[in-house]
Amino acid sequence: MFITGLVFSFTITSGEDSLVSVFGFAGAMLMLFIPLLTTPLVVRESQQGTLELLMTAPVYVWEIVIGKFIAAFSFFVFMLSPTVVYLWFLSHFGQPDLPVILSGYLGMLFLGGLFISIGVLASALCSGQLMAAIVSITVITAFWLIGRFSFVFTGIVGAILLYLSPQPHFFDFIGGVVKLSNVMYFFSLIIGILLITSHILEMRLWR
């Protein structure tokens, strides 16, 4: 919040009446913040021996995974909510484009949801919190940067690498462009990763 506040202060002083710079910086910061948030979700329960008890309760494994995801996502939304005050400042010092700003917040929610799902998966895969954090940061960073290597390849390979990266999809949102393809990109990845996490936990249950 403090760091994004500094970015916002530079935005105000430069005369910019949007949150594009703030969203762009905050999106990159999520690569470090989200792993710290999600690392203990499964690992801690496994270390304390409560994961097996939880998984033998009369609930489906996917419900446990969804519950972990919702808990982390709710905390993320709570941490993001104070930035709404930036909109109040913009409305007093300029004429902000509200649809573009709302689109940016939507992009932040989708990006945070994707990173959280990756973090939950890493927490389910690893037996220690440090290893889970390293795996989570590595995978998230690889996802974030993979589009940068699309220019190395030509044709369909480069197009696939660019599509897999959340950067272009996220930048569309913070630029005020809401596409169904971008929404489906985030939804499909989040759901797919959570399904993989559920499958991994089920395998642990039957070992």
Image (cartoon, rainbow, N blue to C red):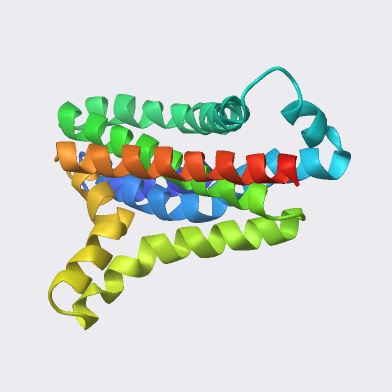
| Relative horizontal placement of residue 28, taking residue 132 as reference (left or right) | left
| Depth order, front residue of 90/40 | 40
Q: Which of the 4 quarters of the picture holds residue 184? A: top left
Q: Residue furthest front?
A: 206
Q: Position of residue 125 (x, y in %)?
A: 65, 53
| Depth order, front residue of 102/144 | 144
| Relative horizontal placement of residue 75, taking residue 113 as reference (left or right) | right
| Relative horizontal placement of residue 32, taking residue 192 as reference (left or right) | right
| Depth order, front residue of 41/103 | 41
Residue at horizontal 27 percent and vertical 67 percent from the top: 161
| Relative horizontal placement of residue 12, taking residue 127 as reference (left or right) | left
Residue at horizontal 55 percent and vertical 55 percent from the top: 32
Q: Position of residue 107 (x, y in %)?
A: 30, 39
Number of numbered discs = 0
Q: Position of residue 52 (x, y in %)?
A: 80, 34
Q: Position of residue 20 (x, y in %)?
A: 26, 46
Residue at horizontal 78 percent and vertical 38 percent from the top: 45
- The answer to whether residue 95 is seen in the rendering is no
- The answer to whether residue 139 is seen in the rendering is yes
Residue at horizontal 48 percent and vertical 29 percent from the top: 77
| Depth order, front residue of 91/177 | 177
